[in-house]
Image (cartoon, rainbow, N blue to C red):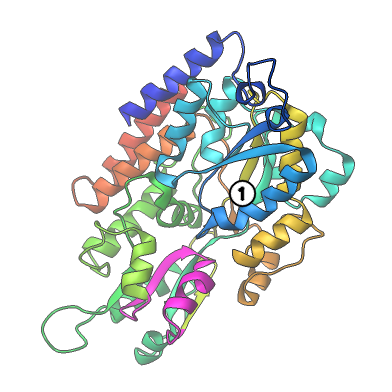
Amino acid sequence: MKKFNKIISIVMISIMTMAAFVGCGAKEGSTDSSVDTKESKKEHISLWLPPIGENDEKVWEPILKEFEEANNCEIDLEIISWENYPEKYATGIAAGEGPDVGYMYAEMFPQFIEVGAVEDLTSYLTEEDYENYIYIEDGKMLGGLYGLAIEAANPAVLYYNKDILAEIGEEPPVTWEDFRRIAKKATKDTDGDGKIDQWGFAQGWGRKMFGDLNWNWYGFNWQAGGELYNDDLKTVRFNDEAGLEAAQFLYDLKFVDKVLPNNAMAQTNKEMLQTTFGPGKAAFSIWLSSAADEILDKSFPDLNYGFITSLQNKDMGTFASVDQLTLMSAAENKELSFKLMEHMLSVDSMTKFHAYHPRAPISKEEPYQGDERLKEMIQNDKGIYRPLVVAPHGVEVYEYLWKQLQSMMAGEVTPQEALDEAARYANDLLAQ
């Protein structure tokens, strides 16, 4: 965490003192005036993306090739792992070697907007864009419109094993009380060897970065009636009464009810889905809705499962990111770079991409190609699934919160201690 904070500081200092950003284009061409080939005249656009699905590069290649041929340019695509993504941005922009077009999630935006590294797209958009892009309002943040959604409506869902629930005489849970009761009944020794081999809740707490807050915290906090930040975004409120209720609920599942697998601190939620829920060894698991088709149906075809969007306590809620394509201020040819964004988000391109990685449509003109079991949820549960509020120091705040919650789930601190320490750290950052 200290390393990341130092990198962010370097980014801010470097960008604010740079006389000009280093972009794409001429830096790739020949400096020899005697060389006048068609290749030397091609502009280069650097594009940074994380892995949205498996084998993304092969899926993007023909889509990007169309743009290259139509615009006499070359696109330098780099797929960056999720774990290294914010740090890669920080170091790249600090060195003047960031992308021309990039992909950002909510937690990343504030620090880069603050130093002028992300372009406000307001002047680039038409009335037709506002009408056609379904999630365009989610690109509005901190006084501008800084992104166009490329990934949305893939919420965290609670998966349940229908056979296990039937065997213990239970229906899918509605409330926290239902969930807790069923998870306790499902946790047992099924083969009589004296060891638990079927668990209530296959939840993982072992991920190194804060990404598993998406499944392990946000939804439970919202269901308790909580929020992450106060309305003015100058302080956090996840350590209030609602936040404590959510943290205590999670803590009790592990230490009082003992419904989490023994290796919960060593695996991620995705790994839990693959190693425990998928093989039929758990009543519940929580992860992306897209895992239904991409993991469970493909790897565990005999698994009899269902899912719900959200449990209910004082409220309902589950996390669903709205991740954005961004135009970086360092791009030398902003018009061409924005044109690439439009091409990537076009009906034709997204239809091709979503044929490989089924997701909700990004524009009103795009056909739905996702899992039919999710279609009704995506269309009707909007408001139950929700993205994060874009707030200052998001990466640092959530990373520290994740570490404190991990300490709580390891039994090293109490729920109150974990939340209070994370809030102290966050509020100190926000006060700077």
Q: Is residue 278 above or below residue 335?
A: below
Most distant residue in the left direction? 194
**Residue 295 forms part of the magenta stretch:** yes
Quadrant occupied by the C terminus: top left
Is 85 placed left or right of 367 in the picture? left
Point out the stretch of residues depicted in magenta. Answer: 278-304
Is 390 placed left or right of 191 in the picture? right
Is 420 placed left or right of 211 in the picture? left
Residue 201 in sight here: yes
Residue 360 place in picture, x, y as percent: 67, 62
Residue at 55 percent across and 53 percent down: it is 57
Residue 162 place in picture, x, y as percent: 44, 85
Residue at 59 percent across and 19 percent down: it is 22
Is 425 placed left or right of 92 in the picture? left
Q: Is residue 250 above or below residue 199?
A: above
**Residue 203 forms part of the magenta stretch:** no
Task: Report the front residue among 304 and 188.
Answer: 304
Q: Quick one: SS at disc 1? A: loop
Q: For residue 181, what is the image quadrant?
A: bottom left
Amino acid on which the number 1 mark rests in the picture: Val
Residue 33 place in picture, x, y as percent: 69, 15
Mark 1, residue position:
322
Residue 360 in sight here: no
Residue at 61 percent across and 21 percent down: it is 27
Quadrant occupied by the N terminus: top left
Q: For residue 77, what is the image quadrant?
A: top right
Residue 372 place in picture, x, y as percent: 65, 76
Q: Is residue 109 above or below residue 360?
A: above
Task: Report the front residue among 355 and 180.
Answer: 355
Other-residue count near label 1 (Cα within 10 Å), few / some / many at <14 / 14–19 / ≥20: many
